[in-house]
Image (cartoon, helix red, strand yellow):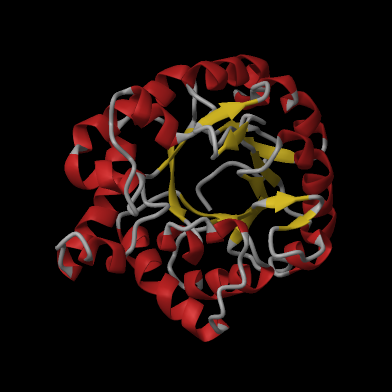
């Protein structure tokens, strides 16, 4: 295990990669999402990672969340080239200069690009999900990230499949659900969901991401209680997307506002997700500074 998340330190994660790329003028309106920039504009991706590193992020997350061999194939990219691109996502994050790199492994629903990562229950068997995730994980692990971020997972069934797919890859993992109303997006109780990681020595942290900030405290308390592992927490800004009007509304709340409470509840990896940018990460780094330097 290469992340020092079990020795009492708290590490600052980065924020939303897509919003930073959009702020730089990149187009992520594509089924590949941020991996479109990996494919077309890798220099812009490196620029975005560096913005978070300068802000104080100690862990940078790769642009592989929505990447897949199938998705790259639809863009005319062969399997060998797709594997190189997945590896490049790790290498670009590494080049940005932060101490640690988390290789993002998004759920099957993210690759569908239809919002089903917020529903789960795709009608696939566990074996089918393992077969989908394993090649992506192998390609990412081969590039040498410090941890695999099994993230925005909506369903305990898929979480179990992802952990199976990661078995033996030689890289530690964190498991992070997206939740609503105190349950997974597929409706499972959190104790049941976190239990799939209990006793798995490959898992270094368990928690939540891409959720409302007010979901975090109860969720990470259950994650720690059920698994005995440190928690990971990186919610969105708290704003809500209004699809009819094509805009975000509500008040943005950066993770710095609650980081001390999350740390007290057992979170050792803290950052932001959608709509959380470098400025919010800089505030978070300032709040966590003394703990992050221990």
The answer to whether 30 is drawn above or below residue 46 in the figure is below
| Front position in the image: 163 or 11 | 163
| Residue 287 percent location from the top left of the image | 67, 16
Residue occupying the point 62% across, 62% down: 119
The answer to whether 49 is drawn above or below residue 67 in the figure is above
**Quadrant in the picture for the C terminus:** top right
Task: Name the residue at the front extreme.
Answer: 244
Residue occupying the point 41% across, 75% down: 132
The answer, for residue 97, to whether it is visible in the render is no
| Front position in the image: 15 or 240 | 240
| Residue 213 percent location from the top left of the image | 72, 34
Left or right of 195, for residue 38:
left
The answer to whether 73 is drawn above or below residue 205 in the figure is below
Q: Quadrant of residue 159?
A: bottom right
| Front position in the image: 74 or 224 | 74
| Residue 100 percent location from the top left of the image | 44, 39
């Amino acid at each position: 295990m290469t992340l020092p998340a079990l020795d009492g330190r708290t590490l600052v994660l980065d924020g939303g990669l897509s919003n930073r790329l959009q702020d730089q003028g990149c187009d992520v309106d594509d089924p590949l999402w941020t991996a479109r920039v990996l494919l077309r504009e890798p220099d812009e991706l490196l620029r975005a990672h560096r913005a978070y590193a300068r802000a104080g992020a100690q862990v940078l997350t790769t642009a592989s969340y929505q990447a897949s061999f199938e998705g790259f194939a639809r863009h005319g990219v062969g399997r060998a080239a797709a594997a190189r691109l997945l590896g490049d996502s790790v290498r670009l994050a590494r080049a940005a200069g932060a101490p640690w790199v988390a290789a993002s492994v998004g759920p099957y629903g993210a690759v569908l690009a239809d919002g089903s990562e917020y529903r789960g229950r795709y009608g696939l068997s566990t074996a089918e999900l393992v077969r989908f995730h394993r090649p992506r994980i192998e390609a990412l692990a081969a590039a040498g990230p410090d941890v695999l971020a099994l993230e925005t997972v909506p369903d305990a069934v898929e979480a179990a499949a992802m952990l199976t797919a990661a078995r033996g890859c030689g890289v530690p993992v964190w498991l992070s659900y997206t939740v609503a109303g105190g349950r997974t997006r597929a409706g499972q109780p959190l104790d049941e969901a976190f239990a799939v990681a209990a006793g798995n020595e490959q898992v270094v942290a368990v928690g939540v991401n891409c959720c409302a900030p007010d979901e975090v405290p109860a969720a990470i308390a259950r994650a720690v209680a059920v698994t005995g592992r440190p928690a990971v927490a990186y919610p969105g800004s708290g704003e809500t997307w209004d699809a009819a009007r094509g805009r975000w509304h509500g008040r943005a709340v950066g993770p710095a506002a609650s980081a001390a409470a999350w740390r007290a509840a057992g979170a050792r990896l803290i950052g932001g997700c959608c709509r959380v940018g470098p400025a919010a990460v800089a505030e978070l780094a300032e709040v966590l500074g003394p703990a992050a330097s221990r």
